Amino acid sequence: MSQDNTPTSPCLLPALGVIGLSGRSRAAQKAPSAAPGTQEAVGFFSPSAQLGQHQPDPMEKHRDLEEILLSVPQSRSVGIEITNKTSVTLRNPSYFCQSGEVFTPPSPSISPQSREMCVFVKRHLSAWGVSGALLYVSEPFSFAVMFYNPRNNTIFDHQYAVEIFQGPTISGSLESLYWSMRGDRPQSQTYRKEVLDKKNSSIVVSDGPYSISATMSNNNKAVLKVLVEEMRGPPPKYTPNCFPHPKDISKDRHPQAFTYLPK
């Protein structure tokens, strides 16, 4: 039998691109070689180009939190982005949802000089919004973030709060801490709460060398950004006149221009 050397038709190339791995290997053994002019077409309709070898993860680091929330199907959500600019690793996250549920869980740890995100959403067919608290711990300090996105932001205001603690533990449960941060307790250097109305401002709390600042938007898909920083020691003290003024030596520095020798 004579071998058929007819070139492969370009119309069949898309079909060849979707053959499975085993099918491609058999086709490579049985299929005749294509004409020289069809090499670029075969490469264009390769299986990797048709099927795609990499599907981007919705929580990839280069994606913005706002972009991620646009793909969330629920009408109410709170996305939290935490940036760690300290020398310690934030670990062992725990969260409490008073209303709503977790959509993307928090990362198990946040390394120094990195950022992580998590998303909480409203429950399906629920008459409530989404609210809760998130806690991260480390050896020198811990901190909690309270968030509240109501079901109707024309009647109720968004709220958020941040509190920092010394050491890796807190007293009481996270649920009790949520209600404490949600209430009207006195604010201090380590605890701040903000009700988002027409005049919104950021939150800053600190304890020792560690400080936490946060901001939150007041729309349906709220964005809450948290920045954890560490001060590298106190600034040097300013001491005016730390160097004594030199003595008046103008006469020594400016001798007489001419010296007359005695006759």
Image (tube, helix red, strand yellow):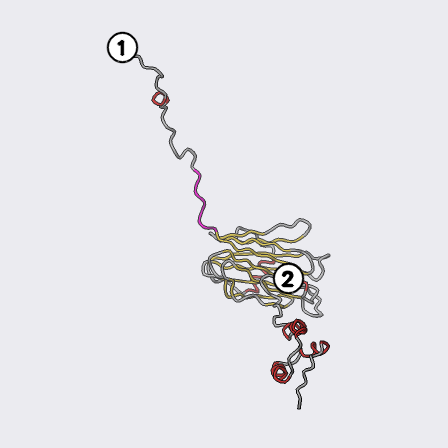
Q: How far apart are marks 2 and 1 (CA)?
A: 97 Å
Expressed as whole percent of the image width and height from the top left, the position of residue 261 reads: 28, 12
Pick the front one: 63 or 51: 51
Is residue 76 found left or right of 173 in the rendered image?
right
Residue bearing the label numbered 2: 78
Magenta-colored segment: predominant secondary structure: loop
Pick the front one: 159 or 209: 209
Q: Earlier in the sequence, mark 2 or mark 1?
A: 2
Quarter in which the C terminus is drawn: top left
Query: Is 104 drawn above or below residue 157 in the view shown?
Result: below
Residue bearing the label numbered 1: 262
| Number of disc labels | 2
Q: Let me know if residue 176 is in the magenta part.
A: no
Extreme residue toward the bottom, this view: 1
Q: Is mark 1 on a helix, strand or loop?
A: loop
The reply to whether residue 253 is visible in this rendering is yes
Inspect the image, locate mark 2, and give the three-letter code of the amino acid beneath it: Val
Callout 2 touching callout 1 (CB < 8 Å) = no
Mark 2 vs mark 1: give the one in front. Answer: 1
Is residue 151 found left or right of 203 in the rendered image?
right
Inspect the image, locate mark 1, and give the three-letter code of the amino acid beneath it: Pro
Task: For label 2, count other residues whose C-alpha is less than 10 Å away and answer few (under 14), some (14-19) or many (20+).
Answer: many
Expressed as whole percent of the image width and height from the top left, the position of residue 127 reads: 71, 66
Pick the front one: 110 or 184: 110
What segment is highlighted magenta in the picture?
231-238
Expressed as whole percent of the image width and height from the top left, the position of residue 229 reads: 51, 54
Residue 221 is marked as none
